[in-house]
Image (spheres, rainbow, N blue to C red):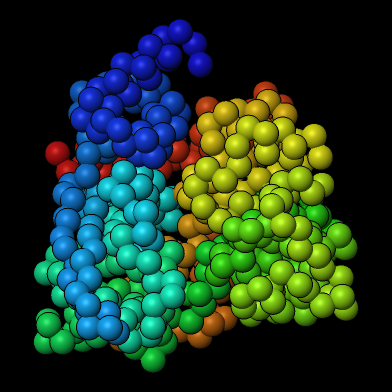
Amino acid sequence: MNDRADALLSNFIDRVAARHEGETEYLQAVTEIARDVLTIEKANSTYTKARILERLTEADRIISFSVIWEDDAGQVQINRGWRVQHSNLLGPYKGGLRWVPDLSPSVLKFLAFEQAFKNALTGLPLGAAKGGADFDPSGRSTAEIRRFATAFMTQLAAHIGPDTDVPAGDIGVGSQEIGVMARVWMQRALRWGGVLTGKPVALGGSAMRTEATGYGLLYFTAAMLDAEGETLKGKRIALSGRGNVSRFAARKAIEQGARVVTMSGRKGTWHAPDGFSPQALDWLVTAEGDSAYSPPEALELTFEEGTRPWGVPCDIALPCATQNEIGLEDAKTLADAGCRYLAEGANMPVTQDAIAHLARAGVLQAPGKAANAGGVAVSGLEMQQNAGFSRWSAAQVDGCLREIMCTIHDRLTSERRSCYTQTGAVDYRRAANVAAYRRLAEAMIAAG
């Protein structure tokens, strides 16, 4: 950035930080996008006058509530719940619910802000929101989780609806929890409706929703490689995590002939030097407890305690675990080991200094708002099926998912003129922010 752009960014972030003091994750997300789009805004007098970006940094509303429920011992438990309804410029509020013990409004605001740009890139009529609770479902019985889900939705129900706000699942909230909450809403509203996505298929959910984010990540990655005249076949992929995104990204990568050399958990990394076999992947995603750390010898898989996936040589890195999981030292290791592509399966998994180092090293990077949009894309397709009282086949949904991810890639490459690297390749991070900003800005101007 030049001195004028640096000054613009500094002044802008100072104003935002004054209203959001101490919200580290949120300010990180705003800074990343502001760095790319402030000059675009200043070059357009209409955008400048309307203060588009500054308005986008303020959520429409933040709903907070208590969740009171009873555990199996009959003890009353108290949790906090939130829903950040960030923007409905493009459609009803849309975004996931996560239940994690350290959840905070700052994290939810960052996720909702990012969701606005992600949803804009899909081309679907979707606004942006995020929500959840500081509840830890691990170690809780099925009955306790059901009681918590019921209490949570009882508090949230008045604020959502098929044309108002359509939540989905996220960390700690799977299809079964969504099913319980969807039924609670229906009973309160005295109507059937697609008020949540990610529902079990028996309750009106869509085929392919579980696979969507991981498959979409690979469809976008394949499009990146194709633009460079390459394919996934034979490429070494370092993957983090072993949840839904990771496991389905790994499965699709193996189908495409790539070699998935790592997956990871909180305690360390599973390493397959010759690539995970389908059998090794099946074993890992079903292994429970300490048994997961002792892979059978026949699978040619080792577990390395206390390590991270990024120390293994790879061609492609797919961080799919959590925010800020790749720091500067990880970025240096990846670049030195020959990594040439990175696509984010998680939200904001790479720190700013790591992003800068990878860019200088010539690594093409796809941000989560583009690369992991497959989940919300299929959520949008589930809304479409619910509204039309129809059900699509898995093949039909998968075909639409692939088309949406390729369209997102094309939308980013169309920004090549103003968003390119020193080598002339597309700067996917900047292009994603700029393309999404343009769509949101035009909607805001159209709204008056």
Rendered position, 232 above or below 328: below
Rendered position, 382 above or below 264: below
- Residue at position x 37%, y 54% in the image: 102
Give the total of numbered labels. Answer: 0
Q: Nearer the viewer, residue 233 or 435?
A: 233
Q: Nearer the viewer, residue 103 or 276?
A: 103
Q: Nearer the viewer, residue 306 or 59?
A: 306
In the image, farthest residue toward the top: 3
- Residue at position x 21%, y 30% in the image: 19
Horizontal and vertical percent position of residue 410: 56, 48
Q: Is residue 133 visible?
A: yes
Horizontal and vertical percent position of residue 396: 52, 79
Q: Is residue 120 visible?
A: no
Q: Nearer the viewer, residue 444 or 339?
A: 339
Q: Is residue 234 left or right of residue 350?
A: right
Q: Answer with the quarter of the image where residue 147 lies.
A: bottom left
Rendered position, 251 above or below 111: below
Horizontal and vertical percent position of residue 297: 87, 75
- Residue at position x 23%, y 25% in the image: 18
Question: Which of the image's four quarters has the C terminus?
Answer: top left
Horizontal and vertical percent position of residue 421: 64, 28
Q: Answer with the quarter of the image where residue 422 lies.
A: top right
- Residue at position x 88%, y 78% in the image: 298
Rendered position, 84 above or below 258: above
In the image, farthest residue toward the bottom: 202
